[in-house]
Image: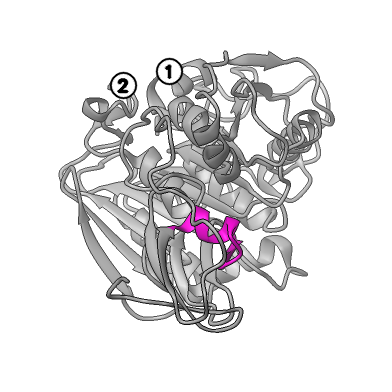
Amino acid sequence: MDSPAPPARRHQVRPLLLALATVAVMVAALLAVATPRASAATLTPVASFGSNPGNLSMYSYVPDGLPAGAPLVVLLHGCAQDAAAYHGHSGWDGFADDDGFALVYAEQKSANNATSCFNWFERGDTARDAGEARSIRSMVEHAVAAHGLDADRVYVSGLSAGGAMAGELLAAYPDVFAGGSVVAGIPVGCAGSMVDAFGCMNPGKNQTPRQWGDAVRAKHSGWGGPWPRVAVWHGTSDTTVVPANGASSVSQWTDVHGLSGGPDSTEQLPGSTTAAYYGGDAATADVAHFTVSGMGHGTPVDPSSGCGTAGAYFLAAVCSTGYTVDFWGIGGGGGTGPTDPPTEEPTDPPTGEPEPGECVTSSNYDHVSAGRAVHRSGQAYAVGSDDVLGLWNLFVTTSLTETSPGFWELTPGGC
């Protein structure tokens, strides 16, 4: 995050707030198995998208043939960047093509901020239905209506100043965003002015989890939940926005979710990355903390796997986009770069109805299609027992046994 410049005077008085949205679709990813991969679309400017008190620009990327009901992901660039640079390096387009979701990029104007930072430190731009926040919410509303997207599966992610703004949007609009990702960003409510912003960036602000959580709750005081699922990414060698900010963001969102103590599970990912999950495992956690050892200030990408390209503030380490998509439950799993879908299903769907007591091994997608499981928020659950099966897709295979008519249970050892 470059030094935040003071916001320039606008030609009109603006209310103040932020609104950003992000959505990704698992439904489209599954449908893509039966049809050719969606051809690459182009990043397209949207001249008019509704109320725009923050004076932002909107760009959209909608894969060809995207079905109705797909998710939406809203993306926010860092300082000294624009929508085209973020789109060209982050790797989000490949996952949108393969997993079936639309992208919206909000772009800052130099007329608003001399270094093109989103004004995450200005209360008038981060309050609900004001300023930049309202402009981003308008973008979400426009995209959902124009492309028939799923309003319940909107997500937001951003880098640096964009990451700080993503957090502000999650707090101001928990009714709009199902999840978010804060990459090298700042905790919600840390700064209320440009002067405050520098101290938040480095050395950071020391507050209790409850104080951080209160800053989120104050932005939409009437909201009783549910709260968005939040992924926090930070490099351990970031001297621009110090790693303490990542830890504070995790404390903030775990408090909002009513969690305390250490992570429920951890795992080691490629690129010297450690993932810690709070409130469950990788598939069910409310908050995830991804720490990239030795990485400086930027978005982690993995060009070797086809996940983004290296550049200014895009650092070769790990595919943060892929792991974020998986954490939200709108991807195919694995956290690697996009790949072409298989030309045929990896497992044949069962023929005929199994007799009670019979065990069936198949993909979670086939289990749901056959009525042995149900799909909720990107996960599959066994009918009857409600056992958690994992991601709802063609690549996760599980075994279910019908212990009584219409009552299915997970069979851990397989059939």
Residue 218 quadrant: bottom right
Q: Is residue 191 magenta?
A: no
| Tally of marks | 2
- Under mark 1, the amino acid is Gly
Q: Position of residue 149 (x, y in %)?
A: 72, 38
- Could you say which disc has been placed on residue 215 in the image? none
Q: Is residue 81 visible?
A: no
Question: Residue at image x 47%, y 48%?
Answer: 181
Q: Position of residue 183 (x, y in %)?
A: 40, 43
Q: Which residues are magenta?
A: 363-376
Q: Nearer the viewer, residue 406 or 277?
A: 406
- The residue that mark 2 highlights is 309
SS under mark 1: helix
Q: Nearer the viewer, residue 279 or 216?
A: 279
Q: Position of residue 81 (x, y in %)?
A: 46, 21
Circles 2 and 1 in contact, beta carbons < 8 Å: yes
- The residue that mark 1 highlights is 88
Question: For this view, does 136 lie left or right of residue 75?
Answer: right
